[in-house]
Image (cartoon, coloured by chain):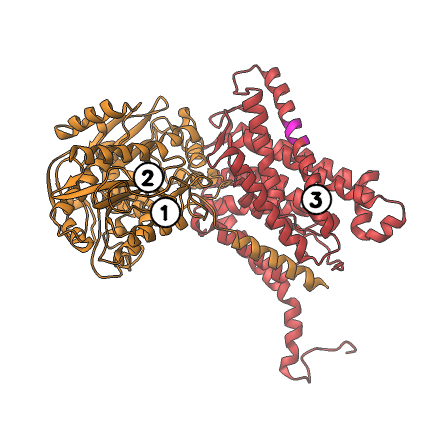
């Protein structure tokens, strides 16, 4: 009879193990939103996650962002930016008339992007003949699902231009998965470009910051996930090139309820000048920062370097303003108030039209992504395949982000990163760091 | 020689059962020996680091202990691994945030006596709500399955765990619920060993856990109600024949588990100053492991298991001399669970009693 009990215990352990799935990201669920349908223009996307068609043209441009949950503030502005650019172009790309539809890849219950919704959206774009290009996605994980579907769309690979995806593997080889990036392009042709620098710029930017702060030794911890371990790896490489001693690169447990005091006591015995964390705030990041400060002291002493998985106000609210004080957080691109020329004109137009409380950093990137797509459509013969092939090698002048080009992989040649510091409970002290090519690892 | 010598005059294979019989012992000695060598090595390498990490482990163990006691109480009486217990604990922490922070406005700015009073109210509220909640869960969900095959209530418990988690997600959202430091924050050290400070609140956690454990042991061992619980655990039918109200006793056990979770959840919020809807999952898993390690159903065993898991985790995370390191902490903990399930299913302090299944 003893064996019965042990078998029950083993089954219990197994079942509990299977439940290891939740976290910051994936689950499934339904969508919400308006209904599709054109008004004089072509038929739009009929998926329930897409809002009504705006404008009336032959070709549909869709946007794909999480419109519910914590990113809502950012994504609503991004859609407004796209519409503003389209209006300024009189809803035309060259001689082709356009209309716009905003689609939602999130669910209310998750409050963030949802893998099932992403896949369903991609299928809806692929099967709606009028869709000529998509601006999106916001999250790299969602792009990993949508790009391969769009890549095999009828009528040729459907173009995606992202204003926000930073996972390098979408466009380049990575050390974490040898199948990247080709696994996202099953048809053999590329259809994805982005206007934001990828994470392989982020690591070097943080390493340059460390050098500037006179950091001699650093200890890295990462969350074992593609993003966190990836950005930690890029940081480690760049730090070594800059002559900073890397004392270790170890993983940490990301489950809520984990305490990190012992981990930091172990790290303290190695006396690092700085700690770099490859991870996300929603993976128990608040606790991680609290325990770092509890064991190693305030961030003015042992520096805390965080990538854009932490670059949000919730890092300060989750760990407490006093504890977060002094932590450095990086994010791709340049801050809104440092835009010049067409960028500052766009900002004043945007503020005049929508009067936002504050312009989000991603808003100008949504405008730039739209400009890339419009130029590719203008130069195309009106087919999906032609638009996609026009993305690569495209040169843009006088955009909201200034002049830039998209290379053969679909990456921008702009590599500027902004590093913020937690000051008095706010993200402040913005400084722009542009890592030189020699520090950036590319596939 | 009157005693038989096992190997002489028999085929060699016959020696195997004797070896297998001793395998548990051999394995035990090997594992304990290895751990001892690593610990001694680390203590020699840097005793300050060693002592600090072990102290952290004791605090962690105390926290696991509060959860593990809830598992073991329920298992002891109806042999159900109540996987929802970790989530009841999570709800305890949520109630503490709602009552203490949102309603009473505890933010550490109040004077000592006011803070203590408000804390008592918060803790009492969380304990009452969790106790009631746990009894309702038992009545609605587990009671109808009491005579069903063992696997049915077990899977139901896992389902209940998801329901409680989703309810918390619904009510509190996916973001962290934070509280201000009410206890002295972690920069207040009781003492310092080398570069390692020992936070006052780490000691408070231990000082609250130990009396709770003692009170529980007293309750189960020495009170009338405890006697009834043990009687129901031993033989439900006989207990009923002797006039014990079995349903009431089981409900009492669940209420006790809930009250414990409410107190533990409040303590968690005081210690960590934040909680989230999925807190119960990992805590519950570690506490379950601790309960199985110590011998599920045995209160002292659960406490022993919890402290072992806490020390194991802290040691693996924080020691430097020949330990696998933080990447392997979960693997180490669950490897221990598997070793225990294979070689000593009754746990360290458990008795190999007959199963009623």
Residue located 55% across and 31% down the image: B269
In the rendered view, does A425 fall on the left or right side of A431?
right
Give A230 or A145, whichever is nearer the viewer.
A145
Q: Is residue A27 magenta?
A: no
Q: Which residue is mark 2?
A: A52
Q: CA distance from mark 1 to mark 3?
A: 40 Å
Q: Which residue is mark 3?
A: B140
Q: Which residues are magenta?
A: B123-128
Asked if the residue under mark 3 is in contact with the one under mark 1, i.e. CB atoms within 8 Å, the reply is: no
- Describe the element under mark 2 as helix, strand or loop: loop
Quarter holding the N terminus of chain A? bottom right
Extreme residue toward the top, this view: B111
Along the polypeptide, which appears first: circle 2 or circle 1?
1
Residue for badge 1: A47
Residue B93 in the image, given as x and y percentages of width and height: 57, 33
Colour in which the image shows chain B: red
Residue B53 image position (x, y, % from top left): 50, 40
Q: Quadrant of residue A252?
A: top left
């Amino acid at each position: 009879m003893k064996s019965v009990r042990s078998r029950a215990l083993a089954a219990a352990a197994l079942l509990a193990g299977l439940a290891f799935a939740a976290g910051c990201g994936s689950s499934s669920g339904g969508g919400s939103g308006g209904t599709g349908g054109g008004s004089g223009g072509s038929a739009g996307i009929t998926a329930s996650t897409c809002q009504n068609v705006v404008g009336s043209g032959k070709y549909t441009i869709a946007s794909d962002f999480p419109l519910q949950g914590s990113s809502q503030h950012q994504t609503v502005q991004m859609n407004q930016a796209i519409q503003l650019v389209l209006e300024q172009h009189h809803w035309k790309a060259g001689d082709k008339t356009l209309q716009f539809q905003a689609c939602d890849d999130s669910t209310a219950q998750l409050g963030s992007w949802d893998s099932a919704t992403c896949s369903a959206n991609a299928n809806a774009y692929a099967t709606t003949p009028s869709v000529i290009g998509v601006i999106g996605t916001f999250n790299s994980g969602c792009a990993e699902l949508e790009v391969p579907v769009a890549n095999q769309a009828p009528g040729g690979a459907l173009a995606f231009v992202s204003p926000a995806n930073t996972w390098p593997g979408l466009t380049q080889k990575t050390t974490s998965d040898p199948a990247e990036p080709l696994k996202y392009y099953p048809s053999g042709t590329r259809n994805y470009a982005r206007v934001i620098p990828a994470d392989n710029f982020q690591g070097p930017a943080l390493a340059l910051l460390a050098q500037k702060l006179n950091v001699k030794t650093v200890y890295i911890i990462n969350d074992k996930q593609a993003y966190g371990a990836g950005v930690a790896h890029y940081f480690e490489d760049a730090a070594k090139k800059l002559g900073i001693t890397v004392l270790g690169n170890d993983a940490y447990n990301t489950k809520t309820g984990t305490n990190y005091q012992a981990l930091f006591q172990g790290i303290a015995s190695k006396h690092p000048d700085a700690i770099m964390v490859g991870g996300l705030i929603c993976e128990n990041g608040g606790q991680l920062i609290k325990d770092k400060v509890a064991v190693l002291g305030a961030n003015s002493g042992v520096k805390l370097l965080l990538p854009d998985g932490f670059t949000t106000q919730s890092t300060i609210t989750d760990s407490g303003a006093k504890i977060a004080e002094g932590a450095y957080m990086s994010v791709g691109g340049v801050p809104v108030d440092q835009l010049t020329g067409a960028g500052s004109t766009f900002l004043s137009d945007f503020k005049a039209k929508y009067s936002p409380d504050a312009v989000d950093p991603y808003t100008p990137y949504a405008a730039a992504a739209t400009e890339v797509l419009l130029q590719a459509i203008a130069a195309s013969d009106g087919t999906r395949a032609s638009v996609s092939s026009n993305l690569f090698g495209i040169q843009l002048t006088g955009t909201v982000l200034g002049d830039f080009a998209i290379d053969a992989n679909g990456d921008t040649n702009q590599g500027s990163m902004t590093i913020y510091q937690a000051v008095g409970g706010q993200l402040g002290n913005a400084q722009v760091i542009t890592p030189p090519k020699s520090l950036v690892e590319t596939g | 020689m009157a005693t038989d010598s096992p190997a002489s005059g028999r085929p060699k294979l016959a020696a195997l059962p004797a070896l297998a019989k001793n395998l548990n012992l051999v394995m035990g000695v090997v594992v304990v020996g290895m751990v001892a060598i690593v610990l001694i090595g680390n203590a020699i390498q840097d005793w300050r680091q060693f002592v600090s990490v072990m102290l952290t482990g004791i605090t962690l163990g105390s926290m696991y202990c509060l959860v593990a006691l809830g598992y073991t109480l329920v298992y002891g009486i109806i042999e159900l691994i109540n996987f929802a217990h970790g989530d009841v604990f999570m709800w305890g922490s949520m109630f503490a945030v709602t009552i203490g922070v949102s309603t009473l406005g505890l933010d550490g700015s109040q004077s000592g006596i006011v803070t203590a009073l408000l804390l008592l109210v918060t803790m009492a509220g969380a304990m009452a709500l969790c106790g009631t909640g746990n009894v309702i869960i038992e009545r609605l969900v587990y009671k109808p399955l009491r005579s069903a095959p063992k696997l049915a209530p077990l899977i139901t418990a896992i389902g209940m765990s998801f329901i409680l988690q989703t309810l918390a997600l619904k009510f509190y959202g996916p973001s962290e619920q934070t509280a201000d430091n009410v206890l002295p924050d972690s920069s207040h050290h009781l003492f310092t060993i080398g570069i390692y400070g020992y936070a006052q609140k780490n000691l408070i956690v231990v000082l609250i856990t130990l009396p709770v454990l003692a009170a529980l042991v007293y309750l189960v061992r020495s009170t009338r109600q405890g006697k009834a619980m043990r009687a129901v655990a031993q033989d439900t039918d006989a207990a009923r024949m002797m006039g014990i109200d079995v349903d009431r006793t089981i409900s009492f056990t669940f209420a006790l588990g809930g009250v414990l979770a409410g107190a533990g959840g409040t303590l968690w919020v005081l210690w960590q100053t934040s909680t989230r809807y999925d807190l119960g999952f990992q805590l519950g898993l570690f506490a379950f492991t601790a309960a199985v390690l110590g011998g599920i159903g045995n209160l002292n065993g659960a406490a022993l298991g919890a402290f072992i898991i806490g020390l194991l985790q802290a040691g693996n995370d924080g020691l430097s001399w020949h330990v696998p390191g933080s990447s392997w902490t979960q693997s180490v903990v669950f490897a221990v669970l598997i070793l225990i399930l294979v070689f000593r299913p009754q746990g360290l302090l458990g008795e190999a009693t007959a199963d009623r299944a």
